[in-house]
Amino acid sequence: MLKTKKSRKVAVAMSGGVDSSVAAAMMVEQGFEVIGLTMQLYDSGRVTASGSKTCCAGQDIYDAKRVSDKLGIKHYTLDYEKRFLDNVIKDFADSYANGITPIPCIRCNQKMKFRDLLNTSLDLGADFLVTGHYASIKGKDDDIALYRAKDISRDQSYFLFATPHEVLKNISFPLGDLTKKETRDYAKKMNLAISDKPESQDICFVQSTAKRGYREIVQKLRPDVKKSGDIIHVNGKLMGKHDGLDSFTVGQRRGLGVISSDGTPLYVTKIDSEENNIYVGSQNDMAIRKFNISELVWLDKKNQNIDRIKEIDVQLSSEHITQKASISLQEFNQASISLNEPNYRVAPGQACVVYDNDRVLGGGWISGELSL
């Protein structure tokens, strides 16, 4: 959704990558007064020394400043390192310690970009905040809604479900109708130095070149995860020992350290953080049809009080695959989901996002007991 009538001053979240840079360039071309804002989220010296592809640190802040200078806009770097640690990285570590698989990008959008950064934008006099996400916002007032991007292969609406309905009117995603190629072509047309810059990695604060990767971060913040425990087959047989819950996620097949007697592939079916045990089984043991979601964010204002919605689409991972299901809204920001067909990769801690075709109705975090 493009806001033009009364909106003349905008802030753009600039990570130093091609997407946010093009979003800023588009706003300049359309005649807005533009402010570039870059969140410094973690120690830039440590990250740049690693040589990994990241965002919001070191070289990326420099790139955002270069693009801002090229476009002739003001640019500010905001020290959000402590906020990012408290709201995203600690949540990431706690999730692994509790036996669930986190999605830090959603937490960052929810608690950093569309809360802290948005509030800063409004305090600076901007009418709305622009980001380089591939998604769309359409409608106005109670009918305003979040939609998938035109290019489904780039769609990021799954990572945006936790953006409250009342916030949608204050943000804009100008790349929603573009493909990645069109975005890079636009950057080249504007002669932006980052037009061929590689994509950032999925988890920006995890060094891809580090031997221990995310486990180093988890163990530093939650040393209790290093406690060894049992690996148990769903039939009750003791299979072996593990050296920490943070080595495992539900659905994991490789690196389990145990094998079945008949050579059948084993998968992690459950992580019991209270007893410090890992459960494994066959692929059939992973079949799930019913589960709950917590921290429900419901964006469909017309169906706030409906008891049950049938034939909706749900997306259960960052892959752009949906399946048919029904949802029952409950109290305390919770809902129950019933899939029409079993899914073999339902993992606690992942997001379940609910769609009506391309429109995001809402979503929440997979939690509680999973069952067939």
Image (cartoon, helix red, strand yellow):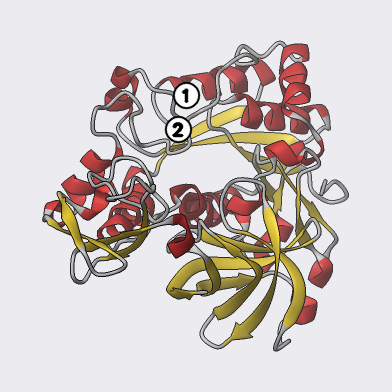
Residue at 34% in and 57% down: 91
Residue at 28% in and 53% down: 93
Q: Amino acid at mark 1?
A: Asp
Neighbor class of circle 1 (other Cα within 10 Å; few <14, some 14-19, many 20+) is many
Q: Are marks 2 and 1 in contact (CB under 8 Å)?
A: yes
Do we see residue 361 in this rendering?
A: yes
Residue at 77% in and 36% down: 32
Residue 188: horizontal and vertical position, in percent? Answer: 73, 12
Q: Which mark is residue 60?
A: 1
Neighbor class of circle 2 (other Cα within 10 Å; few <14, some 14-19, many 20+) is many
Element type at marker 2?
Answer: loop
Residue 252: horizontal and vertical position, in percent? Answer: 38, 48
Q: Quadrant of residue 301?
A: bottom right
The answer to whether 54 is drawn above or below residue 343 in the figure is: above
Q: Is residue 187 left or right of residue 365?
A: right
Q: Which mark is residue 56?
A: 2
Q: CA distance from mark 2 to mark 1?
A: 6 Å
How many labels, in total?
2
Q: Amino acid at mark 2?
A: Cys
Q: Quadrant of residue 215?
A: top left
Query: Looking at the image, which is closer to me, 161 or 6?
Result: 161
Residue at 23% in and 55% down: 245
Query: Looking at the image, which is closer to me, 307 or 195?
Result: 307
Q: Quadrant of residue 229?
A: bottom left
Most extreme residue toward the right is: 5
Do we see residue 127 in this rendering?
A: no
Residue 83: horizontal and vertical position, in percent? Answer: 36, 51
Q: Is residue 274 left or right of residue 145?
A: left
